[in-house]
Amino acid sequence: MTRIAIFPGSFDPITKGHENILRRILPLFDKVIVSIGKNSNKQNYFSLEQREHWIKQVFADEPKVSVETYTGLTIDFCKKQKATYIIRGLRTSADFEFEKAIAQNNKIMADEVETIFILPIPELSAINSNIVRDIIRNGGDASQFVPEGINLSVK
């Protein structure tokens, strides 16, 4: 049986934390689909195409990684992709409470799908896309928080 995992998020933009989590979970799976959710209630800073391009750029050396976009429920996307794992990074206890509720509801909707929580390495635990976007909006240099080669001036 092929072990397929979904790593969902907005990746607006992808951060070193996202990259680190994905590289650490790769040995566990045959395929990981980085899944960029299109949320009509959320105003993204970078275009969907730009975010998709960056993820493909960062993981160009990883044949196990693919990038897909989707709308709707992540659990429905899992079923469509025949993925039986969802990967979620947890930085804080608030992240845990929020993600736990989603994972428990996903389990009710699709018992065959397991959610796996992974902690960032300590030096990356403070990085999140909201902070990176705020640095950019205010004219700061956020390059140290995103993977090498990402040009944040492209919108």
Image: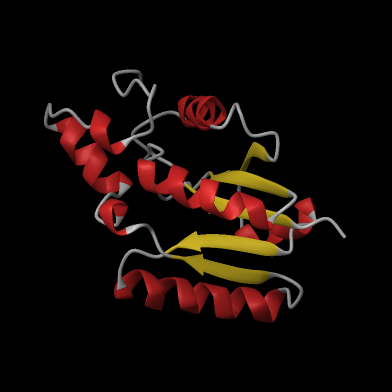
Residue 86's spot in the image, x, y percent?
Answer: 61, 62
Nearer to the camera, 21 or 71: 21
Q: Quadrant of residue 111?
A: bottom right
User: Is 54 placed above or below 65 here?
Assistant: above
Which residue does the image show at 25% across and 40% down from the upper left? 132
Instruction: Indicate the position of residue 55 as horizontal and vertical percent values.
Output: 52, 32
Query: Residue at the right extreme?
Result: 1
Left or right placement of residue 104 versus residue 149 in this view: right
Residue at 52% in and 24% down = 57
* Relative to 27, 84 lies left or right: right
**Closer to the camera in the image, 109 or 88:** 88
Residue 2, compared with residue 16, is above or below; it is below
Query: For the point 31% across and 24% down, which residue is it?
Result: 152
Q: Which residue is depicted at the point 59% across and 44% down?
A: 34
Residue 30 spot, x, y in % from top left? 75, 50
Query: Disc count in the image?
Result: 0
Task: Name the image quarter holding residue 143.
Answer: top left
- Colour style of the rendered protein structure: secondary structure
**141 relative position to 71: left or right:** left
**Nearest the camera: 78 or 3?**
3
- Quarter of the image with the N terminus is bottom right
State which quarter of the image contains the C terminus.
top left
Residue 137, image x, y percentages:
18, 32
Q: Is 142 rendered above or below residue 31?
A: above
